[in-house]
Amino acid sequence: MELASSSAQEARKALGKRLGELRIAAGLTKRALSESLGWHESKASRFESGKRAPSERDLREWCRACGADGEADDLITTARGIEGMYVEWRKMEGHGLKWAQQSALPLWDRTQNFRFYSPWLIPGPIQTASYIKALLTSIRDRRGLVDDVDAAVEVRLEKQKIVYTPRTFVILLEESALYNRTGGTEVMAGQLGYLLSAMALPRVSIGIIPRDIDRPLMPVEGFFMFDDHTVKVELVSAHLTVEQKHELAMYAKTFAELYELAVHGGAARELIRAAIESLG
């Protein structure tokens, strides 16, 4: 599968460059290395250019041919990380929504500063149980998954307790996210009411970007930043992990610009109350 993520492509190129450095240090041409391993020369070229992902066996054979067996384990770890950057939902959720929720726990546990931007939904840390269930039920039905929604909701609710720990959460919502009636009127009313309560949490900052402002920066895809080392993006078909430094810097800059467009405190609460009143 060709990876759709530019982040993954750049990482694969970096891995290929490292393989080329090992080959050159060993005094081997691509042809000589390929012949020693019984490969077609194009295979080595595609690895070094980043056009093809090497398997664990390929990496061990490459390192052995270059007299660099000690490099193999690090390269294998790097390659596994690259393949994890772009993961189709059908693969991530193949064992059910509960497993997919659990897989995110290690990242949440080691993160101290969370920055979330959501143009269409209320994000995970401040969702109610009813909202979570409606959202996961919709995902289950759309993707044809096994029915473990209730178990997945329990995992998500347990994960939410992190907002009461010594971590910081800065959450930016487009005002339009307040009007997308996930789960229907009653569920949305409860969710918006909880949003008002969450604003009082000492380590949670919630900003709303008004929909009627003149804005220099248009809405972008929703993204979740974990400290300064990882960004998660949810696409229609897949889950994207961004870890390349220059891309992380772009997301950080975009988040800062969006933050300047948002209103906070009383002004944000007024927008939420208006959304509640619109429910009738």
Image: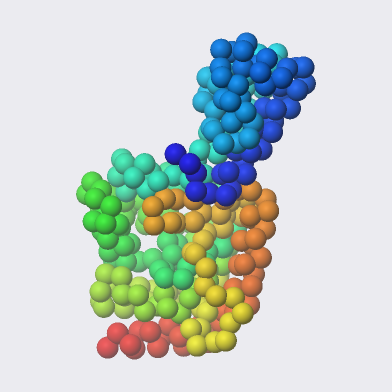
Up the image or down, 141 lies above or below 37; here it is below
Up the image or down, 30 lies above or below 225; here it is above
* Quadrant in the picture for residue 114: bottom right
Relative side of 118 to 38, left or right:
left
**Where's residue 125, x and y in %?**
45, 62
- Is the C terminus in the top left, top right, bottom left or bottom right quadrant? bottom left
Identify the residue at image location x=73%, y=27%.
Answer: 21
**Where's residue 238, x and y in %?**
42, 50
* Quadrant in the picture for residue 65: top right
Residue 111 shows up from this direction: no
- Is the N terminus in the top left, top right, bottom left or bottom right quadrant? top left
**Where's residue 243, x and y in %?**
60, 48
Identify the residue at image location x=31%, y=70%.
Answer: 182
Relative side of 187 to 62, left or right:
left
Residue 65 shows up from this direction: yes
Report the colour scheme: rainbow
Identify the residue at image location x=44%, y=65%.
Answer: 123
Up the image or down, 224 lies above or below 206; here it is above
Up the image or down, 37 lies above or below 266; here it is above
**Where's residue 168, x and y in %?**
58, 62
Observer-nearest residue: 101 or 72? 72
Observer-nearest residue: 68 or 96? 68
Identify the residue at image location x=46%, y=71%.
Answer: 119
